[in-house]
Amino acid sequence: MRADDVMLIGDIAARTGLSVSAIRFYEARGLITPIRSPGGQRRFRRADIRRLSFIRIAQQLGLSIEDIAGELARLPSGRTPTAEDWARISRSIRASLDARIATLQQVRSRLDGCIGCGCLSLKKCALYNAGDKAGATGAGPRYLLGETP
């Protein structure tokens, strides 16, 4: 590995916009694995810039650390990920995002009406949730959780 292929933690933090403590956290969670110098200093591969950037974007999309770890585990550890590697992850995440978008659209369309929470305080509740029939399937806002009024 060439000397210009590795970076110190402060350098990779500057390149990714992440704090040093965030990078250490991701290391502790196994999302990235730095090389250790003989003196114990962390050295990061240039490919880690893309991994850290992916982590940052994935968190903004609402993926959990566990989901992110699962996706990153599909990447090769011994080489820089290719465009095809990233496309495969993108397809996986796209399916998850599409499902969340559908849920959000459903919530948005039902937000003004009865949400099936059992309060029965709106006049609409008498139509959509008479006698709290939604409560028979569980607690909480049943209609916003995906059940049909």
Image (cartoon, grey):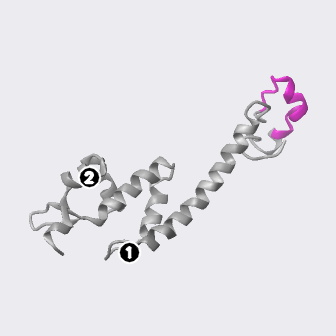
- Type of residue at label 2? Arg
Q: Report the disc number at residue 76.
A: 1
Image-based side of 119 in relation to 89, left or right: right
Residue 89, visible in the rendered structure: yes
For this rendering, which residue is in front, 95 or 32?
95
The percent coordinates of residue 139 (x first, y second) are 73, 39
On whether residue 84 falls in the magenta region, the answer is no
Q: Amino acid at mark 1?
A: Pro
Q: Nearer the viewer, mark 1 or mark 2?
A: 2
Q: Residue at x 69, y 44 (%)?
A: 105
| CA distance separating discs 1 and 2 | 22 Å
Q: Residues within 10 Å of mark 1 (few under 14, many from 20)?
A: few
Residue extent of the magenta highlight = 118-134
In the shown orientation, is residue 99 left or right of residue 148? left
Residue sitting nearer the eye, 87 or 24: 87
Among the two numbered marks 1 and 2 on one chain, the one whose residue lies closer to the N terminus? 2
In the rendered image, residue 83, in percent from the top left (x then y), is placed at 43, 71
Q: Nearer the viewer, residue 104 or 126?
A: 104
Q: Secondary structure at mark 1?
A: loop
Image quarter in which the N terminus is found = bottom left
**Dots 1 and 2: beta carbons under 8 Å?**
no
Quarter location, residue 119: top right
Q: Residue furthest front?
A: 83
The 10 Å Cα crowd at callout 2, few under 14, some 14 to 19, many 20 or more, is: few
Say which residue appears at 47% left-offset and 65% top-offset. 71
Of the pair 100 and 82, the residue shown nearer to us: 82
> Helix, strand or loop at disc 2?
helix
Which residue is drawn at the image coordinates 30% and 66% (left, top)?
A: 47
Percent from the top left, x then y, of residue 102? 68, 50
Left or right of 112? Residue 77 is left
Q: Badge 2 is on which residue? A: 15
Query: Does residue 121 show up magenta in the picture?
Result: yes
